[in-house]
Amino acid sequence: MGYNAAPLERLVEQFSKFPGIGRKGATRMAYQVLSMDAKEAAELANAIQEAHTRLHRCRICQDYTEQEVCRICSNPKRDQSVICVVESPRDVSAFERTREYNGLYHVLHGLISPMDGIGAEQLCVKELLARLQNGKVKEVIMATNPTVEGEATALYLAKLIKPLGIRTTRLAYGLPVGSSLEYADETTLYRALSGRGEL
């Protein structure tokens, strides 16, 4: 326990569970919540509750949605022959901001990381492979982050997909190694997408 009153300390503890938020940042956030009036605090609590109860994974691509199938998967104007494989739903948003990609997505919800005890079976790999059985998909773009885990995951998936006769490509390196797609600007992402190469 810290020096704060117990309810404040619990709030700090909850905020410090967020990635990239240390105790100092968590304490600032907790005091920010305390400075809200009752209506604002209730709205924040409701928004968290609502996101948790109303959002679930799309039955096809595993992105978050309120419907059974998300708006991208259910859009007949999207190119059904290309699937862009990403680590998290945040990456889908990053690609959508470029307005240059018109295919579909598949969200893995993580990367293979033996150090953290995460293997392929904990990711949405079988769901991806199931989507490749219909003969419509001609290319799978590996858009995992250019990190050791991102590379390992892309290569693992490429090995599984290649025997199916589907072209497997990797984003070009307009993206600095070790960076996160979420923070890449639209132009860099577009260049990485348009300059992708075979895996």
Image (cartoon, rainbow, N blue to C red):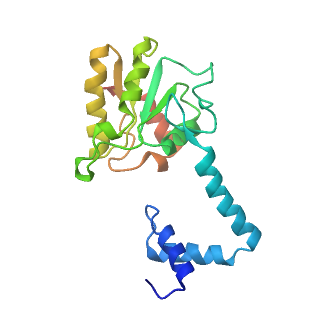
Q: Quick one: 66 or 149, which is closer to the camera?
A: 66
Q: Residue at x 74, y 72 (%)?
A: 38
Query: Relative to residue 156, is residue 106 drawn left or right?
Result: right
Relative vertical location of residue 94 with respect to residue 59 in this rendering, above or below: below
User: In which image quadrant can residue 98 be found?
Assistant: top right
Where residue 158 appears, as percent x and y from the top left, is: 29, 26
Q: Is residue 196 visible?
A: no
Where residue 45 appears, as percent x and y from the top left, is: 65, 62
Q: Is the C terminus in the top left, top right, bottom left or bottom right quadrant?
A: top left
Relative vertical location of residue 50 with respect to residue 121 in this rendering, above or below: below
Q: Residue at x 37, y 34 (%)?
A: 172
Q: Quick one: 69 or 20, which is closer to the camera?
A: 69
Where residue 147 appears, as percent x and y from the top left, is: 31, 46
**Residue farthest to the bottom?**
3
Query: Relative to residue 148, is residue 139 drawn left or right?
Result: right
**Residue farthest to the left?**
115
Where residue 181 appears, as percent x and y from the top left, is: 44, 45
Query: Relative to residue 60, is residue 135 drawn left or right?
Result: left
Q: Is the N terminus in the top left, top right, bottom left or bottom right quadrant?
A: bottom left
Q: Residue at x 40, y 15 (%)?
A: 133
Q: Residue at x 30, y 29 (%)?
A: 157
